[in-house]
Amino acid sequence: MIQFETSRFGKLEVAEDKVIQFPAGLLGFPRVKRYVLLDYEDTPIKWLQAIDDPDVAFIVMEPRMLVQDYTISLDATTRQALLLDAEEDLAILAIVRVEKGQVLANLKGPLLFNSRLKIGIQAVLE
Amino acid sequence: MLVLTRKSGEAINVGDEVTVTVLEIRGNQVRLGIQAPLNIIIHRRELYEKIRAENLMSSGLSVDDFKKIRERLK
């Protein structure tokens, strides 16, 4: 188990195998490399909480909840970065925020995960 | 900033593993070919900046914001 502080949820303890590594960080957060997905109340929306920075947490959800036919095509670089060899290991989450009462999702910069190896990357789509 | 002048077909190396080649110059557009290891991620700068800015706006939301999002999406 690893323990860490968070500014929103206090002290948390999670199993090592729940830790998601973002080797390159997220854009703008290159040094924050370890995250954990937190379920919050009874909703498919989750928190992606940084382990290495108590203040950094993103609200995330599956993009298909917002755009039913959302698909992306992975290039070789992304595949390699995720060490992805089976399509069923790929998980996609979009960062959402609320601005003036409107929910905005960042569908151009989705978070891609190898759910088996717990590796993440933020894609930048054209 | 290091400034270098290159002709079409010429290249620069960045470290041992990255080569940037000027493929074609046409008017005010330059086509670049970039050879780099797969773990180096290359983006057009403006796309990168846009997503970076969105991340910065999204990283500090509160539990109240979460509840607002959940309500909106019900």
Image: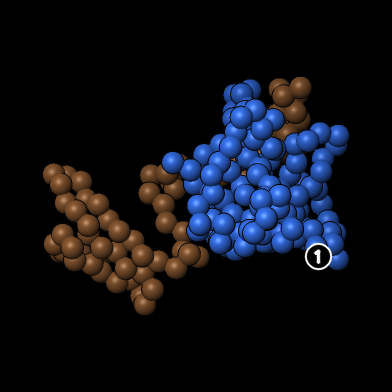
Residue type, label 1: Glu
**Position of residue A41 measured from the top left corner of the image (x, y, whole percent):** 85, 36
Q: Residue furthest bottom?
A: B16
**Position of residue B68 measured from the top left corner of the image (x, y, whole percent):** 72, 27
* Residue at 75% from the left image edge and 36% from the top image edge: A45
> From the viewer's perspective, is residue B19 above or below residue A69?
below
- Label 1 is found on which chain of the structure? A
Task: From the viewer's side, name the closer residue of B58 and B34.
Answer: B34
- Determine the image quadrant of residue A118: bottom right
Relative to B12, A83 lies left or right: right
> From the viewer's perspective, is residue A5 above or below residue A60?
below
Relative to B67, A42 lies left or right: right
Q: Colour of chain A?
A: blue
- Determine the image quadrant of residue A80: bottom right
Relative to A81, B66 lies left or right: right
Tag 1 residue: A16
Q: Which secondary structure, mark 1?
A: helix
Relative to B41, A90 lies left or right: right
Task: From the viewer's side, name the closer residue of A21 and B72.
Answer: A21
Q: Colour of chain B?
A: brown
Task: From the viewer's side, name the closer residue of A81 and B63.
Answer: A81
**Position of residue A58 measured from the top left corner of the image (x, y, whole percent):** 66, 44
* Residue at 71% from the left image edge and 49% from the top image edge: A88
**Residue A22 seen in the figure:** no
* Residue at 55% from the left image edge and 41% from the top image edge: A72
**Position of residue A2 measured from the top left corner of the image (x, y, whole percent):** 82, 65
